[in-house]
Image (cartoon, rainbow, N blue to C red):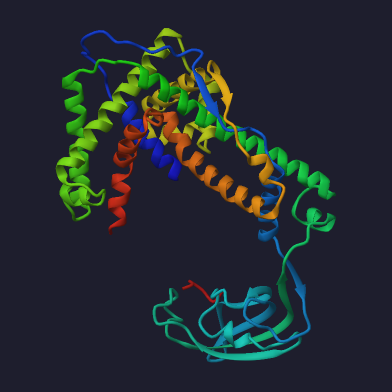
Amino acid sequence: MKKFALLCICGAVAAAVLTGCSGSDKLAQYKGVEVYVASREVSEGEVYAKVKEIMDANPNYVEVDRPAKEGDIVNIDYVGTQDGVEFAGGTGDGVDLTLGSNRFIEGFESGLIGTKKGDHKVLNLTFPENYSEAALAGQAVEFSVDVNAVKEKQDAVLDDAFVQRVSPFQTVDEFMADTKADLETEKNRQIDTQKQQDVLSLVVNDSDMKLSRSEVSKRYNQELDNYTQQAKAFGTTLSGMAQSYGTDEAGFKQMIMASVKQQMKTQKVIDTIAAQENLVPDDADRQAFAEMNGTDINTLVDSYGEETVAELVKNYKVMKFLADNAVEKTAGTEEGAAGETEAAESTVAAETTAAAGTAAAETTAAAGTAAAETTAAAETTAANATAAEETTQAQTESNAQ
């Protein structure tokens, strides 16, 4: 859903009509642009960090012969009754319950601490007053519980048994090779996305596109009105919204104007290249764009309309064309050495996670229109694109299980 939100914002940018421009445009050289990219190599540190993440998400649960404590898993059968009559939703067999998870009503899980396999426990409890099932809200009930097993969580061990438990592979070597291949695919996707943004940014920066004053003014007034209405809807003013960005109303209006101009310039560069190269999106482009956004083309069209989606797919095709025709240079890194020690592996893991989050957030925005701009312009665009969301931010369990 977050991707869709970004896509919608970009669709508004893409829909800006650029007409009545005066003067001559100067489109920068857009083929053979030199762009630096991160190393596409996946280090051993990254592989081990990913495997460690999978192991942490899939611990072992080992049955123990001792009293249960918080954090343990108890496997239980239970029957809930009210005035001696079983009530709906109050019965379960072979249920694994982590003590301390707060899945059950207050007193249920804490009442099982100290029990062992084979124990029978009767819990006299009261449902919360605000319980979703009106017939049980505030009512006293009794749970009859049999403890079938007590299990504790233990760190997973990377061996063939673990691999077979969490994957379709049989050996650690197969699992490691597949994990590396997945990381390579994801890293290449991230780098390709960033490359598209960077190439477009360079071309836009070096281009001189004449914008119609009347169209800039029209678009600015539309954006200003949008923010004014958003502020009113959430009980604040444009001045109050500006304060959330650490500026005053005049400064906020300047940010909007800068964003509008950069968006319109970027879109005009894209449109000009599309026309010169006769880049007309086909079904394969539409499918690729939809997959990049984690959905299908019909869902996008239903959500944002055929016209907006067509514009976005065209922008995506142009950005891919620019990247495909760029000269890729690899920036020097020390990542390979980082994989030699456990400390370095942790660092790599953190950096990889951060990079993945950044790339995911930028992918759809890039496919729109204004993701690849100079640092200053990108910051104002980001401020513009997220204002509504941040303004909005200024604003027990439903059954026995």
Q: Position of residue 313 (x, y in %)?
A: 45, 24
How many marks are shown on the rendered structure? 0
Q: Which quadrant holds residue 400?
A: bottom right
Q: Position of residue 235 (x, y in %)?
A: 19, 56
* Above or below 104: residue 11: above
Q: Depth check: give the residue in front, 45 or 104.
A: 45
Instruction: Using residue 157 as the reference point, say whether residue 283 is left or right of it.
Output: left
Where, quadrant-wise, is the C terminus in this rendering? Answer: bottom right
Instruction: Using residue 289 as the reference point, say whether residue 276 is left or right of it.
Output: left
* Above or below 55: residue 362: above
Q: Residue at x 72, y 48 (%)?
A: 340
* Above or below 202: residue 86: below
Where, quadrant-wise, is the N terminus in this rendering? Answer: top left
Q: Position of residue 334 (x, y in %)?
A: 63, 39
* Above or below 256: residue 264: above
Q: Residue at x 22, y 9 (%)?
A: 23
Instruction: Using residue 149 as the reference point, say whether residue 31 is left or right of it.
Output: left
Q: Position of residue 228 (x, y in %)?
A: 18, 44
Q: Which quadrant holds residue 371?
A: top left
Q: Depth check: give the residue in front, 34 or 266.
A: 34
Q: Residue at x 27, y 51 (%)?
A: 391
Q: Residue at x 66, y 45 (%)?
A: 338
Q: Depth check: give the residue in front, 48 or 219.
A: 48
